[in-house]
């Protein structure tokens, strides 16, 4: 994340805060008094006057009800000679607010602090600081300067008096300079979030500890932060929390990918809020976060790592575990392939702000496609799907290439993938075929013990159906050739002379049809156990091994039939990239309409498949 | 005490008798102690102990004293009966005389028993486990020589023992038992043969053949001779093949024991010419087993050999092939006096039967034995025969060396200068020869393929050798040596092939650290190798960067556990494999220790000193890419097969289909 992006998110957050933290019926309102308090503590100042009683119930401080005499917070320096008096305002400093929101009155009161208290006996300098988490205009500045010039330079006869002004920028800078710690978060999150920070620094991304300890903690944090009807402050806090976490990555070599993982879960939690909130400001905040945090961070990361991804076998895992290493390498490679696909898909969906930005956007899409091709060329493991759910990665790779018109690359990639899967289907590559039950544990067990676990399932496949349909984005000759190869070799398990490979039973092709309330749940949970699974009989049902002549035609007709009989319209409001991310994270099967719409066009289209648009 | 008093009575003045008494007394004490599970009363170290005991047992009373001492209760079909006999064997030793003594006591014990008990004891012997069986088998010929069995029981008993000893090196002792049975009781043996004839499915064929062959030339009474001729004809002319097999194979024991005449041999040849395919193999097998035979005249042996040379070919049965190879090995023994011609002729016999199926391991072991015997005639003889064999049956030889190791032979070959014949195999047009050649190149750590061999083979030979190398797996160091030896030829070949060669250099150097270091050591000054090493160095640096970056750092849930599981399984697999292949390991008891840093054992009442544990390890380098890209490597091999087929103009062989 760049410094500017970080500043931007901190600014959003600080600006969204109220003057005081207070617990209301509708929830806790986060105030920037807590931020100022922590900035002061970071500077080694001692609290002199606080507006709250620390350590109140529910880990939030209790607001004091006593008169404050214009002073929101006050601190004494470590040598006890300086007194810092804060006047807080969550308003813009301008003429209109000067009187309306008591800037004038409060500053005057604050300029006359009581120095008779025991801990102020040694004070020689009084600094009155007007802190406001908004911007200002010229009139506001003029009013401030005139007032402070007129209030004199002495308090009583022993202390000098000076005035400062901390606006949004100043507060953000101070936060960025020394407060990227859990202390920056509202008090109620401090201990939980501190624990998360230490876990983030210690646990390797993907390890058992990560999965079993950090992830549940992170989900709990997200659940508490983004409760129903979460306001903008909560949403704005999320990127700040992520920024702080990142600061705690330390020397953990997996901090970067781990951070992306946490961002992804955060984004899904935020998009759940997006689906339910009625506040535009909240929606805008989430959309900003998607683009400026997730997409931007993916882009930054892969821009930095593209060279490493294109090193031959650079993603290979080595533990001396034989073919187990190949499974781990595939998991890592597919993880990156999926993120590059996500990046490409998300970039594609972000509309250019101005028409002249379009070429730049297209260049970016080509660049991402190049990174992905580089990754796949260099890492054979990226062409080693292990689970049926890896049809999401299949879709993402296809989509990345398709949206920049790289039909030739799609053809070569699908052919290579088919060859590699054929090698596995033959049983001679020491790796099992795709597990339909999507259990990486089963795959590992299979490879490690060379014994097929009872729950391992390679008799049914959504993946292969998806692969067959993706072939329809190719020119007819390529399509027919590839469709026949996939069906004969992978689906029927035959070699090219028509003989069945030993131990290979035909695989049942499946199509997943989502449930009606799909859009309500897709972001929040796995829908693998929902919806309908259709067995696709392409050949003669009485002879499952028959190799139909007109396969492309059969598939095409099935697509049309299933779209007509099980119509589904992608709802507005959720970007496809968000849905795909949700499916990726929750292991939900992907909506076939995502690729069908692109390949076969809208349902009424009379000319499905490869189009001249594609060729261009 | 009573035995000692008896001794006094039998002859106190004769020093021999006195010694005999002492020995016999010791034996009695020993047996009494053994019967009461006590330790040995007296340890006798007497070289001539067996002879003394044999003399003593000539006295019936002493024999009965001994029987009483050994079997205080009546002999019964229990393991204790045989244990006592073993104790006696331990006392008298393991000479021929000792066997006679034990056999004599055993038969005496059976003679005093009821017939049913006697047969039950013999049946119990046939079912004995382990060492005791083999120990007493050497004495059984005495028992069956002294004790006449019922014919029906003899068939069952001998068939049972025959099954026990089948395929074991100790089965010679058994055939001695059968011969003794036939010689002493030919009438019973003939009856037994008729029983076998009528129930052939339940009797081992070789037992029937042996009895028939043994009886053939025994001096039988006229009635027995008529009976023999009758049953011999029955076997010889039977419509079913297995009866004729018995007749044909029976000539081998006849030949060993008494020899055969040229007329008899010619009769067999005639049966061969008129016989079925199976019968032809039977007769080749029988003739092979009969030769050269100490009881055979040299003329008959020459006749048999000539006939075999004319009739042996690759179509004969596996068993016949085995006997031919055995004959070839025996002939090598016979001609070790320096008759080179015989050796040459006999190796022709071996080549004639090729190929030998890989499953026929016994035949291959005989081949190895023959090759080892070839060394006696000089290394050139070994090399000539081995490489002729390699040319004629490369896949069989390759497979069997790979599975069995043939360590001695490989060690012997490894000491010779065989780069030239190995090189010729490597550049052969025949895929199997190339594979064997590359295997030998690796296994015998051949330094280089001689340039003359490469020049002679032309570009095609070099390309075929190179692609065959790509298909297989070789150790890193060998890969480097092989590729280096091709470089002088590759430089003059087309650029496409040079590109392939460069890629292969890179792949091998990536795959094996051993290859990399060997290339650096041997050929760092060759431009082609320099270029590859430079590219590789850049690549390794890039990999190091990538693998220390965050892209490959993430962990995969379940990976660590699966890797541990794999390594555990792999380790167990290696242990089982080692035990299966190692004669020594198979004999050792394997104990899994649960705690501690040293090992102690309590065996036979003795507690050994603690032995500190030590780590024994053997390292081998595995090709990285096989694990990194298993599908890719499989597809690559398939593509290489297609390339080889293009070069040779053939269709891809069955290997191609087997690859996928």
Image: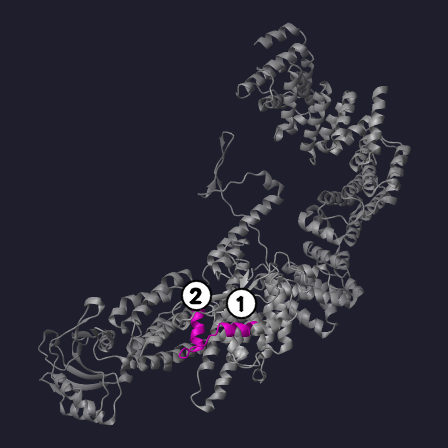
- The crowd level at tag 2 (other Cα within 10 Å; few <14, some 14-19, many 20+) is some
Asked where in the image residue B65 lies, by quadrant, the reply is top right
Do labels 2 and 1 touch, CB within 8 Å? no
Direction top: furthest residue: B9
Q: Secondary structure at mark 2?
A: loop
- Residue on which the image places disc 1: A463
Q: Is residue A90 visible?
A: yes
- In the rendered image, the vertical position of residue B9 relative to residue A54, given as above or below: above
Q: Residue at x 69, y 26 (%)?
A: B157
- The residue at the point 22 percent across, 91 percent down is A94
Pick the quarter of the image with the C terminus of chain A.
Answer: bottom right
Chain containing mark 2: A
Q: Which residues are magenta?
A: A558-585
Q: CA distance from mark 2 to mark 1?
A: 17 Å
Tell which circle, 2 or 1, labels the residue nearer the N-terminal end.
Answer: 1
Of tags 2 and 1, which is closer to the observer?
2
Res. A530 mark: 2
Left or right side of A149 for A373: right
Decide if residue B534 is in sight here: no
Residue A485 in which image quadrant? bottom right
Q: Position of residue B408 (x, y in %)?
A: 70, 46
Label 1 sits on a secondary structure element that is helix
Taking the magenta stretch, the answer to whether it contains residue A560 is yes
Chain letter behind tag 1: A
Considering the whole magenta stretch, tell me its main secondary structure.
Answer: helix
- Give residue B9's position: percent from left, percent from top: 63, 5
């Amino acid at each position: 994340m760049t410094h500017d992006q970080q500043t931007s998110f901190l600014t959003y957050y600080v600006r969204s805060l109220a003057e005081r933290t207070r617990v209301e019926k509708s929830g806790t309102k986060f105030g920037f008094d807590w931020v100022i308090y922590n900035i002061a503590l970071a500077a080694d100042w001692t609290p002199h006057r606080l507006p709250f009683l620390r350590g109140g119930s529910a880990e939030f401080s209790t607001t004091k009800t006593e008169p404050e005499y214009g002073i929101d917070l006050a601190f004494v320096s470590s040598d006890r000679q300086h007194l810092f008096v804060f006047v807080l305002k969550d308003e813009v400093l301008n003429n209109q607010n000067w009187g309306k929101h008591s800037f004038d009155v409060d500053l005057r009161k604050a300029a006359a602090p009581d120095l008779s208290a025991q801990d102020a006996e040694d004070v020689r300098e009084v600094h009155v600081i007007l802190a406001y988490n908004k911007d200002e205009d010229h009139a506001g500045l003029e009013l401030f300067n005139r007032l402070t010039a007129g209030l004199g330079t002495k308090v009583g006869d022993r202390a000098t008096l000076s005035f400062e002004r901390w606006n949004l920028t100043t507060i953000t800078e101070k936060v960025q300079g020394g407060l990227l710690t859990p202390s920056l978060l509202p008090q109620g999150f401090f201990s939980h979030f501190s624990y998360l920070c230490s876990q983030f620094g210690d646990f390797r991304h993907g390890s058992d500890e990560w999965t079993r300890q950090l992830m549940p903690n992170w989900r709990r944090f997200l659940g508490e932060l983004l409760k129903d009807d979460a306001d903008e402050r909560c949403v704005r806090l999320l990127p700040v929390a992520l920024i702080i976490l990142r600061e705690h990555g330390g020397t953990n070599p997996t901090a970067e990918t781990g951070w992306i993982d946490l961002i992804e879960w955060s984004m899904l939690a935020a998009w759940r809020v997006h689906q339910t909130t009625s506040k535009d400001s909240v929606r805008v905040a989430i959309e900003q976060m998607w683009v400026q945090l997730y997409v931007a961070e993916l882009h930054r990361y892969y821009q930095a790592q593209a060279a490493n991804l294109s090193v031959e076998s650079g993603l290979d895992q080595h533990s001396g575990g034989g073919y187990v290493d190949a499974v781990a390498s595939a998991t890592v490679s597919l993880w990156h392939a999926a993120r590059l696909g996500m990046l490409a898909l998300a970039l594609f969906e972000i509309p250019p702000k101005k028409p002249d930005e379009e070429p730049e956007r297209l260049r970016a899409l080509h660049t991402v496609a190049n990174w992905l091709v580089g990754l796949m060329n260099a890492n054979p493991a990226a062409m080693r799907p292990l689970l049926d759910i890896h049809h999401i990665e299949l879709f993402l790779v296809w989509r990345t290439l398709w949206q920049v018109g790289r039909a030739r690359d799609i053809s070569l990639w699908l052919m290579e993938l088919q060859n590699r899967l054929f090698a596995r289907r033959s049983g001679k590559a020491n790796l099992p075929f795709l597990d339909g039950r999507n259990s990486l544990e089963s795959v590992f067990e299979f490879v490690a013990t060379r014994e097929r676990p009872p729950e391992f399932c390679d008799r049914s496949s959504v993946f292969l159906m998806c692969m067959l349909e993706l072939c329809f984005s190719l020119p007819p000759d390529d399509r027919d050739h590839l469709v026949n190869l996939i069906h004969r070799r992978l689906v029927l398990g035959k070699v090219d002379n028509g003989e069945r490979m030993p131990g290979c039973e035909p695989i049942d092709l499946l199509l997943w049809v989502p449930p009606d309330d799909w859009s309500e749940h897709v972001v929040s949970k796995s829908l693998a156990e929902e919806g309908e699974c259709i067995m696709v009989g392409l050949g003669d049902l009485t002879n499952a091994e028959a190799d139909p002549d007109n396969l492309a035609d059969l598939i095409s007709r099935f697509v049309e039939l299933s779209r007509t009989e099980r119509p589904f319209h992608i709802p507005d409001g959720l970007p496809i990239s968000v849905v795909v991310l949700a499916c990726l994270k929750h292991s939900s099967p992907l909506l076939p309409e995502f690729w069908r719409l692109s390949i076969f066009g809208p349902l009424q289209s009379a000319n499905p498949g490869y189009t001249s648009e594609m060729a261009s | 005490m009573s035995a000692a008093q008896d001794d006094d009575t039998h002859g106190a003045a004769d020093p021999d008798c006195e010694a005999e008494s002492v020995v016999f007394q010791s034996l009695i004490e020993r047996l009494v102690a053994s019967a009461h599970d006590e330790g040995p009363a007296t340890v006798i170290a007497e070289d001539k102990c067996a002879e003394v005991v044999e003399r003593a047992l000539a006295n019936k009373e002493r024999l009965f004293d001994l029987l009483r001492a050994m079997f205080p209760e009546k002999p019964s079909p229990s393991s204790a009966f045989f244990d006592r006999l073993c104790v006696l064997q331990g006392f008298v030793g393991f000479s021929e005389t000792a066997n006679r003594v034990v056999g004599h006591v055993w038969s005496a014990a059976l003679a005093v028993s009821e017939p049913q008990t006697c047969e039950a004891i013999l049946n119990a012997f046939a079912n004995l486990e382990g060492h005791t069986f083999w120990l007493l088998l050497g004495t059984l010929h005495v028992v069956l020589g002294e004790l006449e069995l019922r014919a029906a029981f003899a068939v069952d008993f001998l068939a049972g023992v025959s099954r026990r000893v089948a395929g074991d090196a100790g089965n010679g002792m058994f055939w001695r038992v059968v011969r003794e049975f036939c010689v002493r009781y030919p009438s019973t043996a003939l009856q037994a043969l008729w029983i076998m004839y009528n129930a052939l499915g339940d009797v081992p064929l070789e037992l029937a053949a042996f009895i028939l062959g043994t009886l053939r030339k025994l001096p039988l009474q006229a009635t027995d001779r008529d009976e023999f001729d009758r049953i011999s004809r029955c076997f010889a002319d039977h419509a079913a093949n297995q009866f004729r097999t018995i007749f044909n194979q029976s000539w081998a024991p006849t030949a060993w024991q008494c020899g055969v005449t040229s007329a008899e041999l010619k009769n067999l040849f005639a049966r061969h010419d008129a016989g079925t395919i199976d019968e032809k193999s039977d007769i080749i097998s029988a003739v092979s087993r009969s030769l050269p035979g100490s009881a055979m005249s040299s003329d008959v042996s020459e006749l048999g050999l000539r006939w075999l040379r004319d009739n042996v070919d690759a179509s004969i049965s596996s068993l016949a092939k085995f006997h031919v190879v055995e004959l070839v090995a025996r002939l090598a023994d016979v001609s070790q006096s320096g008759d080179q011609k015989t050796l040459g002729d006999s190796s022709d016999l071996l080549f004639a039967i090729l190929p030998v199926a890989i499953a026929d391991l016994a035949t291959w072991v005989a081949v190895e034995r023959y090759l080892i015997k070839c060394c006696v005639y000089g290394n050139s003889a070994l090399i000539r025969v081995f490489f002729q064999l390699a040319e004629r049956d490369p896949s069989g030889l390759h497979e069997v060396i790979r599975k069995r190791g043939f360590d001695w032979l490989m060690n012997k070959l490894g000491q010779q200068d065989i780069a030239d014949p190995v090189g010729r195999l490597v550049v052969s047009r025949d895929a199997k020869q190339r594979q064997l050649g590359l295997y030998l190149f690796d296994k015998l750590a051949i330094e280089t393929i001689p340039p003359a061999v490469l020049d002679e083979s032309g570009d095609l030979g070099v390309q075929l050798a190179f692609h065959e190398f790509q298909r297989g797996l070789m150790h890193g160091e060998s890969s480097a040596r092989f590729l280096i030896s091709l470089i002088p030829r590759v430089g003059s070949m087309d650029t496409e092939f040079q590109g392939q060669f460069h890629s292969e250099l890179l792949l091998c150097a990536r795959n094996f650290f051993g290859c990399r270091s060997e290339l650096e050591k041997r050929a760092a000054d060759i431009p082609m190798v320099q270029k590859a090493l430079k590219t590789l160095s850049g690549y390794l640096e890039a990999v190091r960067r990538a693998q220390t970056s965050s892209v490959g750092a993430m962990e995969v849930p379940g990976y660590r556990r699966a890797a541990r599981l794999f390594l555990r399984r792999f380790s167990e697999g290696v242990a089982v494999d080692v035990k299966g292949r190692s004669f020594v390991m198979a004999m050792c008891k394997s104990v899994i220790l649960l705690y501690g840093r040293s090992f102690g054992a309590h065996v036979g009442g003795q507690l050994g000193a603690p032995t500190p544990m030590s780590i024994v390890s053997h390292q081998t380098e595995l090709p990285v890419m096989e694990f990194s890209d298993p599908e890719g490597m499989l597809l690559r091999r398939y593509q290489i097969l297609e390339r080889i087929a293009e070069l040779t103009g053939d269709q891809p062989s069955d290997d191609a289909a087997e690859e996928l």
